[in-house]
């Protein structure tokens, strides 16, 4: 939950519960938390991204209706989520 929300932050609606909690990609619904990959087998973190337990790098793309930050996979999903 962010106290000061930027006016430019995108509000996502129509997400499923896991997406709205930031646990799934808002574009392709891949999970960032399952299956849980042991830390030593996760890829090295990419600067500017978050890597969850499943090892999928993701980038914040806005907030859900619940106010939680939501994420998209790094790559095509983030590009589609953020056309600019
Ligand atoms: Zn995705």
Image (cartoon, rainbow, N blue to C red):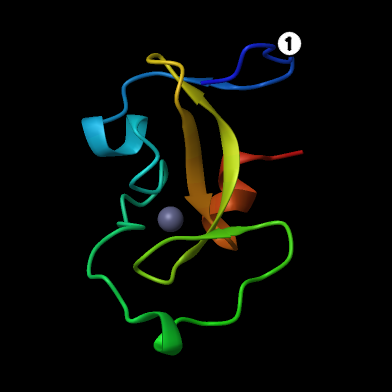
Residue 16 relative to residue 45: left or right: left
Q: Nearer the viewer, residue 38 or 58?
A: 38
Instruction: Tell me if residue 44 comes above or below residue 70 in the rendering.
Output: below
Ligand 1 is located in which of the four quadrants?
bottom left
Asked whether mark 1 and ligand 1 are closer than 8 Å, the reply comes as no
Q: Nearer the viewer, residue 19 or 14?
A: 19
Q: Residue at x 36, y 58 (%)?
A: 32
Residue 61: image location, x then y, percent? 59, 37
- 73 over 8 or under it: above or below: below
Number of numbered callouts drawn: 1
The residue where tag 1 is placed is: 7
Rendered residue at 31%/21% (across/down): 14
Place of residue 50 in the rendered image (x, y in percent of width and height, measured from the top left): 56, 57
Q: Is residue 84 toward the left or the right of residue 43 in the image?
A: right
39 versus 3 height, above or below: below
Residue nearest the observer in this picture, 30 or 76: 30
Name the residue rendered at 62%, 72% in the picture: 45
Residue at image location 30% in from the left, 57% down from the top: 31
Where 81 sits versus 39, above or below? above
Q: Position of residue 43 (x, y in %)?
A: 52, 82
- Mark 1 Cα shell of 10 Å, populated few (<14), some (14-19), many (≥20): few
Residue 2 image-quadrant placement: top right
> Please, what secondary structure does the residue beneath circle 1 have?
loop
Q: Quadrant of the C terminus?
A: top right
Residue closest to the far bottom: 41
């Amino acid at each position: 939950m962010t106290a000061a929300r930027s006016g430019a932050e995108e509000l996502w609606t129509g997400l499923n519960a896991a997406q709205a909690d930031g646990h799934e990609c808002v574009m392709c619904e891949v999970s960032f938390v399952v299956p849980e990959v042991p830390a030593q087998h996760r890829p090295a973190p990419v600067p500017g991204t978050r890597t969850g337990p499943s090892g999928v790098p993701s980038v914040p793309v806005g907030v859900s209706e619940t106010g939680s930050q939501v994420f998209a996979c790094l790559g095509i999903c983030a590009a589609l989520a953020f056309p600019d």
